[in-house]
Amino acid sequence: MEVKIKSMKYEDFKDNEYIEQLINELKASHTNVVVGCLDEVINWGRSNSLWPLTFATSCCGIEFMSLGAARYDMARFGFEVARASPRQADFVMVAGTIVHRMAPVLRRLYDQLAEPKYVVAVGGCAVSGGPFKKSYHVLKGVDEILPVDVYIPGCPPRPEAMFYGLMQLQRKVKVEKFFGGVNRQEKREKVLGK
Amino acid sequence: MANIQQEISSFLPEATFVEGTILEVSVPDAKWHDLALYLHDKLHFDYLVSIVGMDWGETMGCVYYFTCTADNSQVSVKVETADRENPLLHSVTDLWKSAYLYEREVYDFYGIRFINHPDMRRLFLRNDWVGYPLRKDYNADPEVNPIRLEHEAVDDTTHAIVETPDGKLEERTNTIFAPEEFVVNIGPQHPATHGVLRLRTSLDGEIVKKIDVYCGYVHRGIEKLCESLTYPQTLHFADRLDYMSAQQNRHAVCLCIEDALRLEIPARAQYVRTIMDELMRISSHLLFYATFCMDLGATTAFFYGFRDREKILDIFEETCGARMTFNYYTIGGLMADIHPDFQRKVKEFCAYLPGMLKDYHTLFTGNVIAQQRMKGVGLLSREDAISYGIAGPSGRASGWACDVRKNHPYALYDQVEFKEIVRTEGDVFARYMVRMDEILESIHIIEQLIDNIPEGDYALKMKPIIKLPEGRYFRQVEASRGPLGIFIESHGDKYPYRLKINSACLPLVGGLDPMCRGGKIADLIAIGGSLDYVIPDMDR
Amino acid sequence: MNSALFVVVLITGLALVGAALLIAGLISPRSFNPQKGEAYECGIPSRGESWMQFKVGYYLFAILYLMFDVETVFLFPWAVILKDLGVAGLFNILFFMVVLILGLVYAWKKGALEWK
Amino acid sequence: MLFDFSIVTHWIDNLLRSVMPGWGALLVEFVLVGVALLLLYAVLALFYIYFERKVCAFFQCRLGPNRVGPYGIFQSVADMFKILIKELISLNHIDKFLFNLAPYLVIVASMLAFGCLPFGKGLQVIDFNIGVFFLIAVSSIGVLGILLAGWSSHNKFTLIGAIRSGAQMVSYELSIGLSVLTMVVFAGTMSITGIVEAQNNGWFIFTGHIPAIVAFLIYLVAGTAETNRGPFDLPEAESELTAGYHTEYSGIHFGFFYLAEYLNLFIVSGVASLLFLGGWMPLHIPGWEGFNYVMDCIPSVLWFFGKAIVISFIIIWFKWSFPRLRIDQLLRLEWKYLLPLNLINLFVMVLIVIYGLHF
């Protein structure tokens, strides 16, 4: 089974092993046909309509804006509707350095995102701390406080690189198991103990 | 300059002087406020450029840089205190309003508290941060300041040390927001704060009553990092400060180091640097146009600004290999020669852009709604602009001719002919128009230079290890958003003892509160957009 | 017949919302954490109550609106039969309108139309 | 000449009555009407989302969605799938009842208004004799939804958004009312069918002289404001109030607002085409029989949707070209310019009608 992304050959993606591993996990779970088809339809919708949270702290944010602007135009892929409210966004592009003061804010934004939610770490700073790794006030990668789905290295990454990263996110979404996977319904009492 | 020295020594005999490119006066703290008053009122040093906090080992203190806006003469004052446990200095917030943020910054980094400063809170770091990071004896152990995921406590009051008339010091608290006020956080994650600035805004209906600015949401500790890097290594941070004036920032650092080394850089490099600086300015102002229009709700204008900015990025990319962080200038010249297509592309662009600007004006500037949103909003008088240190295009919109390219020319700015755009209205519209006109002026500068780039070396041969002679150096360039100053104190090592970046954007937010008071929320957004601050530049 | 159809359309609207909410409630994921239920305010915890005494500048506008909306409601039946009433109809209603317009002029002069 | 859809409906009615008792037939018909309305509603909303994205991309030198299906036509379908399965966040400290009620109000209001529109000859669900009046009345329920949504969220941004929307909608309701009134004066009836039939000999915008044109322009401005679209999108001013009154709504809850926004755009354009451009009435020029005949060959449904989409295009054009107004400017525009202009316009129209000066 291949994960198809329009106009991109499967071989052109770098880390197919990871996706294949996900596919194998999916196959191993033995979903029945009906649920599997429903999964596919829903994942088709989800992967083609990933709305980013407008979140940017530094240089990468400008490249993120270029991504939305006329030359690169992320609207083509359905990433168009950048929402300012985390309630309506699907993923947060952590574009830029995250510092100690920002960490609780970002965590709160992440917590407030509606499920299913994804995190893309954009640029050296968000991936690992980048040139500011040794600083007293900078996080060594946003994965210290959030689970990250896709890393896009670069300082800042070119918009093409961001597209590549977002397509990887789409692929990841496409091979997810929605029923019984993504759509788990936690009980409020169990989590919050109220 | 000798004149200033005489006047100061006649006023304050105990002052000592160090001659340099900028005269440096040392005074004991007890006399400092008197001298400040004298400098401000009698010698008319009305523009406080920078306050550099310093830790000299035994003593701690500040170096102040002043400019007289009438004749652009400069002077610096060094004040120190030997008490490292509880360092106290006198505040000058009563004379220069820009000192309000600068002194808070010094307190944040060095723990020096200022007497009579109304608001001694931390500026960049969390209010529960332990230690003062720029002190030389700072404990950098991550255990001391771990990543905290709980939110910092809300502080509605400030601490202040007030000197009573009989000379005693008293701790006081000032209230920022009363409990019953309707306080909204605009930012850090907000589409219109251009990054992660947090404005705590007290509202009365739609009307802004007070704004309290919180910085530091992208404070990356660049100044501290620089202290452990060699001079060529410090350069790359400059690109990441105000990424919209990456070239100019790097120019400032290079200039400061080249000045200290007394280097004469090749003419070819000078030409290319000047052209690159101006291209960067155009790109920045185009981004300003894009984001400002977006803030006012004219979404399509955003795309036009970005479309044309891409053309400059193409030019940059061919020569520098990057779209944003260029790493192009280096000490003694440039990293690489220009691309063979550079001149042709730049000329094409210079011919292309003015036509597009006309489009911009028809789309946005001439629009009735846009005019109403901009005119008469966010007024800033010339005096206030100087006092708050709001220079750059925003200052020029208030009638203050503060262009460093004219006042203290560097590179080729004394050889090219260009107008300094100054408007007198001081409102959002003026700030917008100054930038739009500066684009044309930049094109004019580029057109004068592009055909005359001389052949020859593009860089001096430099030794791999650069050591700066001992001393304090301060250089400014006109970045896209105003004067960016680089202060270096060298103790003769290959590392700077202290490298301070005097941001062009930090003073801008200082003026937000008085400009926005009484306006609507929509005005706040328009004013913020027109000031065009870049947060990583002010947070550093 | 029309009233019945009105009810049908009403039910259709309610059904649309109800059905969509039902589907969403059944299949959409749920997760909880202490911060999720809090109000979103640019990523910072809200200070104090949001339901507090808050100056609403549009209060005057609401009153003015009430006045003019009632007028519009009165005018509709008149508008339908205007052709039959002829000039007399115009003069009958003119008095009514003049009073209202005077009201608007008064509010204007008093500065009630400025958002404060 | 034009195909009358009531023939079809009568045929279905007769067919049903022949196989089942009267009440059963009626019940089936009601279900059919509901399903048809629902489908049309959903399809139109999806179409409008796609339409707006493509149009704005065109203004902005972009391509717009083009990956999902040919030319990206399934983009909005994908969005709806996504929105449907998004989590519905349960919030603390909110007024739960009002919070959940708000989407119902918004959708029901737009659905009721939608039901009043004449999509074609004989193709109309609700046809009261006070049709236009009813239309205005139900569409103003939506305001209540927005107001409640903002207030019940217990969030400062939504509160400001709600208050803004209150001020804005209340004011512009007036302009809509008066400009519609102007046309009612001209038509002499409030029945929607009546108004459309009255335009058989030329659309009102042509026959009604200048007052009709003025009323049309005022209606366009006020209609844009009513639908919360730029340059009047203050209640959800992205750059000021993050997402405005629906900041706290997630998943399908937000989807309802999103859907209703686009549907309201269609309703406003539909009403404009009904009042000023003849609704489903083809372009007739008195005396040109041949021309009228050709025009009649185009189905009435196409006429109605064509006009509505053209007007929507203009409203979308507004949104993507103009900067946003400030709240005081917005109210000044309404109370100091549009309202007096509207009153004068009404007066002129009355004179025209009384003295029979129209075509």
Image (cartoon, coloured by chain):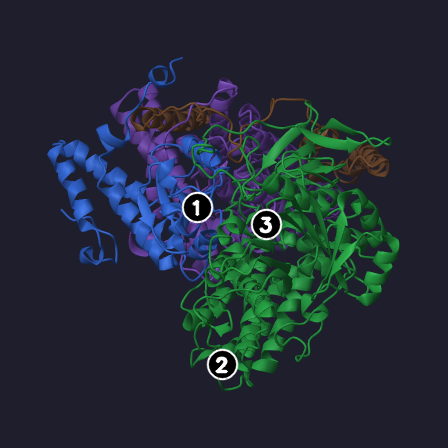
Chain colours: A blue, B green, C brown, D purple
Q: How far apart are marks 3 and 2 (CA)?
A: 34 Å
Label annotation for residue B538: 3
Which residue is rendered at x = 51% and y = 27% of the image?
C39
Q: Name the residue under label 2.
A: B343
In the displayed structure, B180 sits above or below B491; it is: above
Q: Please, what is the three-letter code of the amino acid marked with disc 2?
A: Gln
**How many C-alpha atoms fall within 10 Å of the one at disc 2: few (<14), some, or many (≥20)?**
some
Q: Position of residue B176 (x, y in %)?
A: 70, 30
Task: Tell whether D356 sits left or right of B337.
Answer: right
Closer to the camera in the image, D220 or B1 = B1
Question: Do we see residue D146 in this rendering?
Answer: yes
Q: Name the residue under label 1.
A: A81
Task: Tell whether D218 sits left or right of A84.
Answer: right
Which residue is rendered at x = 42% and y = 25% of the image?
C14
Task: Tell whether A92 sits left or right of B31.
Answer: left
Look at the numbered disc 1 and give the secondary structure of its residue: loop
